Amino acid sequence: MNKKEWKKYKFGELGQIFNGNSINKNEKEKHFKGLTEGIPYIGTKDVGFDHKITYESDVKIPKTKYDRFKLAPANTILICAEGGSAGKKIAVTDRDIYFGNKLFAINPTNQNCNQLIFYYCLSDIFAKQFKDVMAGLIGGVSLNNFKELSISLPSFSEQQRIVHILNKLFKDIDIAKANTEKNLQNSRSLFESYLNRAIAKPKNGWVKKKIGDIAMTQYGLSLSMNNEKKGFKIFRMGEVQDGRLIDTGKMKYVDIDNSEFEKYKLLPNDVLFNRTNSIKLVGKTGIFDLEGDYCFASYLIRVSPDKKSLFSQYLNYFINSKLFQEQIKQKASESINQANINATILSNESIWFPVSLEEQKNIITNLDKMKAETEHLKSIYQKKLTALERLKKSLLHQAFIGNL
């Protein structure tokens, strides 16, 4: 079908376009949280970037409160309206729900158009339109502006043809993605398994010691930071990645004098332990191997081993091992969405290692080699996942310029 025969609509002409209802925190805790019966209340956190909805929300709307909320029936399209997820979190409901005011609902008058409209919302053509009307400090689109966005639709028979093709191709792509993601996970597990085997238990010629007996610990700086490049670069917990400290190019600075900086200056092979984070990420450790002047923030602990007894690289591998991580996380203090492991807990944890520095060096060399090989595999799988996602975007683009 010629694209010229497609008809252009404003979103507001497609059917019901509306946002949900907000619930303040106190009211949510008192009346809606922890209910076993009722209709799920979906917030932006429950809509994934993978276009799936988590319905097992801990918030439900009971029958006695239905009349206070706007219902989104099954097969409604949901789109995040503001914030970093705006225009990116998009999904279709498979059941009736109530939902938050930071989500838009599209409930087309003609339900037969629903799937193609959903696919359009995933396209780069829609993304550009949405981005062009975003406003405000946190970035968002008003309901009125959303209704003014446009979409071109072909005849119903052509819609069915396009949806059939996209469904089939996307199913094949999703299978390929699932296989690739499994391979990616296997490559991660491969190194973890090798590391755990290397250090599983003390061997002949090894010693077992508390970290505090063979290393010094130090908390980082607890000062305000700046983006104006005043002072010295400071590492934060997000810059501890895959066992290393990474200068992301977006680092913050701390404005201190030289004498204060010397107390917190990172030296080659310093190990930094992340003491505060989510329970999943707390305990992440990275080794410093960069050139330049850097210091570190208070939610990181510097661990400096006695160089005559223990290589920093070995210590870094050991702390990042599944064996050690599971052990120390059991002793973390937890509050809402956060866990903490202080320097005392860390210092009292035991590690084991060869007395011989030469044997330590051999273990480090083997681990470095295995890590490089698995990182290469991970890179291949990551590139394949990116290529598959680009293929999806390309197919959507072709569909909505009339070339599919």
Image (cartoon, grey):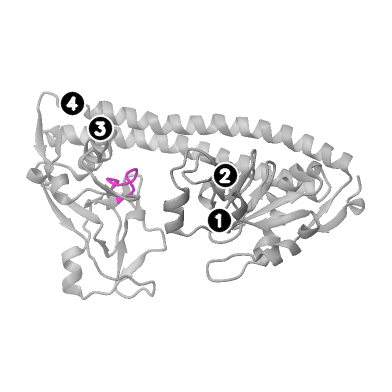
In this figure, which residue is indicated by the disc labeled 3? Answer: 323
What amino acid is found at the position of numbered circle 2 in the picture?
A: Lys
Find the distance from the CA under tag 4 to the CA under tag 1.
45 Å
Find the distance from the CA under tag 2 to the CA under tag 4.
57 Å
The mark that comes first in sequence, 2 or 4, is: 2
The mark that comes first in sequence, 3 or 1, is: 1
Horizontal arrangement in the rendering, residue 274 relative to residue 382 (left or right) = left
Q: Residue at x 53, y 51 (%)?
A: 43
In this rendering, is residue 217 above or below 149?
Answer: above
From the image, state whether disc 2 or disc 1 is nearer to you.
Answer: 2
Magenta stretch? Answer: 277-285
In this figure, which residue is indicated by the disc labeled 2? Answer: 63
State the SS at label 1: loop
Could you say which is closer to the camera, residue 296 or residue 72? 72
The mark that comes first in sequence, 4 or 1, is: 1
Magenta span main SS: loop
Could you say which is closer to the camera, residue 96 or residue 164? 96
From the image, state whether disc 3 or disc 1 is nearer to you.
Answer: 1
From the image, state whether disc 3 or disc 2 is nearer to you.
Answer: 2
